[in-house]
Image (cartoon, coloured by chain):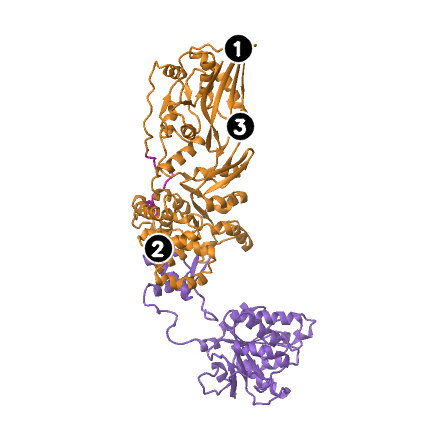
Amino acid sequence: MIACTLTACLDGVRARRVEVEADIGGGLPSFSIVGLTDRAVQEARERVRAALRNSGFTFPSHRLTVNLAPAEMRKEGTAFDVAIALAILGSAGQPGLDQRGAAFIGELGLDGSLRPVRGALALTTELAGVGAERLYVPASNAAEAAGCGAPVHGVGSLEELVAHLRGEAAIPAVGPPHRRVVPAGDDVDLSEIHGQTVPKRALEVAAAGGHHVLFMGPPGAGKTMLARALRGLLPDLEAGAAREVTSMHSVAGLLDGVGWLTRPPLRTPHHSISIAGLIGGGSAFSPGELSLAHRGVLVLDELPEFRRDCLEALREPLEEGHLRLSRKGGTRLLPASFILVATANPCPCGRSAETANGDDECVCPPDMVARYQRRISGPLRDRIDLVVQVRSVRIERLGGGAGETSIKARERVVRARQVQRLRQGSGHLNAQLDAAGLKRVCPMEPAAAAEVTNIANRYRLSGRGFHGALRVARSIADLDGTIAISLDQLLEACEYRR
Amino acid sequence: MSTGVEGPWRSLSPADAGYPRLLKEIRAAPEVEVAGVLDPDAEMVAVVGSRRCSTYGEDLAYKLGAELAGAGLVVVSGLARGIDGAAHRGALDAGGLTVAVMGTGRDTIYPHQHIALAHRIAGQGALMTQFPLETVARPENFPQRNATISGMSLGVVVVEARRRSGAMLTAGAAGNQGRVVMAVPGSIHNPNSRGCHDLVRDGARLVTGAEEVIQELRNDPLFQLLKPSGPDPGRKRYGDARDVILELLSGRAMTLDEVAGRLRVTAREAATALATLRLDGAVEVRDGVYQERRRRGLGA
């Protein structure tokens, strides 16, 4: 007799539906799972056998074959356990299991308890999309999976689930995902940074328009602190973005099961990171830092110290907001739309910026300095709209007033983003405007328009460079709440471009 | 038959305002005719040498001409073959100003191979002669011409010169007029450098590049003569925060944030003020640091 259950499998950061078929036939007792499975799925045999027995069922002593369809798709992970167990029960003739419109994900413990899986939100979203009417997930994945588009039931054990499917016990559906307040963590509040008027302003402009920022300066100037202050200026994630971010973190196994993430992520990989760690990969696919920073902030401290292939890998996401990963089994398009905040020393020893004024001695030979700066290639630099010099604040000025808080600045950013949403549609920030879009949304006051050629010449701006300046000017105007770009706004933008 | 430069020529006597300041100071300052632009207060330096010179000398003269002109000095020479021509060309190619003091009347360019060069000089500096029309190239005229070259200059750089040559006469005149005499050394086997070595032996300053030439000139008391008196016209021209910024940057290069911090203004105010200063060419940015644009020439 054949029985069938519905489940899903992660494919990159998305999911695909999988049907589990179980067949019991004559022959010597055996248990095999087919369907292009990895080792974790093969081991499901032992987990399922023990879980069934310990939940009070008899494991069929016949020739048992389980097929995971579609058979051509590579399957990995432990989320099939529950679906396999139910398919076996069905094929063994367990009476009264009502599985219509139901789908199951979850890993089984030997005692029959359900354990959480990676990517529950992605899996349930896919299942809801292909028509599943009720979803059964491990209890600790329920908070995350709720809101996938179909009722979600958090299940504690296999025994409880079978009783429920027989109509003997109720498992209530969980409510909509609660949006939780994420503790500040690594964040730095603007009010903790003394002085640094211009770098702070650059952060505000970056947050408003989604522009990438490069802070240049000697060690100890406070570049890293500034970089970690950006997230605090960003508004909470909208529902769609929160789903993407939560799903991504779930796939990476970084979710703690409390609910959806509502604050933009902040990722700060070290410069020793490998290319796979940055863009994602591995035999059991895991998203890289670029994707984990999606809809949030990616801080790359000491940008020139990163490996060359890592730096080049940044170009596509910086420009397109996604990255293409070609691996065995095809090309995957991974979301990677983030604000980059990079920091760099002017030279390997980091002191050459001070030398000009005789404060300290830089010992780097000039050719080494040039080579160091060339590591950030032209195309990469071109994609960074804001380049700001940072110097240490002198001790005597450290005592000054604390300045405004991040929350205060965030209010202005939120307003500027509302303006952009009305004008450009949701999810299109100024930083993503192309030439045609710029032309449409950047009317200029006559005084500004008259100076455009002069400015482009004097600042030696290429076409691409000028567009970068214009995008920043647009964000500044949005912060000011003006429609046409004024000369002052344009000039300010130009000064933030190297 | 005329091989001269047509352009509008004008006469200048030592009493005229447009007459070169330093040339006024020499004994028997000549009346001259000039075609082109000649700033009487300009800082000038002469680069002279042999007509028959080595490639080494020619390259060096070209480079000196270019670098001195690039630093804002006016390069003076005699339009002759060899070193003179190379120095003029260097200055022209660097986009600077150069003055050719001719040993002929204004209707004759000598040597005729330099007619094109003379036209370029008239457009990017000046041609100058103290000789009447129809004066052709004659050896006895050159010493007077050489005294004019050194007379209008703060100093004379001799690039390559034989022991008995026109360049040595220019150096001698320069010494008599109290101008700095500088010489570039060469190979001891090269007869073209023996004059230079003699000059060094006699107390001329040994120089190997434009930087050293500028240093020598700057140290010379004569340089003070050319310094404009009264307040520096570069300051106090805006009547707002920009003057303060210029004052700040004249002492020390600063980042945008440092300027904003010192002035206690917003990022916007500092950025727009600096932007207009950049558009005016009063301030430049190197490696993200703002500095007052170096006044061209010797001004320290």
Where is mark 2, residue-wise? B267
Q: Residue at x 44, y 63 (%)?
A: A458
Residues at discs 2 and 1 in contact (Cβ within 8 Å): no
- Rounded to the nearest angstrom, the CA distance separating label 1 from label 3 is 27 Å
Where is mark 1, residue-wise? A62
- Residue B157 drawn at (x, y percent): 57, 75
Q: Which residues are magenta?
A: A181-193
Quadrant where the image shows the C terminus of chain A: bottom left
| Secondary structure under the numbered disc 1 in the rendered image | loop
- Chain bearing tag 1 is A
Q: Is residue A403 visible?
A: yes
Q: For residue A143, which quarter of the picture?
A: top left
- Residue B42 drawn at (x, y percent): 48, 76
Label 3: few (<14), some (14–19) or many (≥20) C-alpha neighbours in 10 Å: some
| Secondary structure under the numbered disc 3 in the rendered image | loop
Where is mark 3, residue-wise? A74
- Chain bearing tag 2 is B
Q: Would residue A191 be counted in the magenta stretch?
A: yes
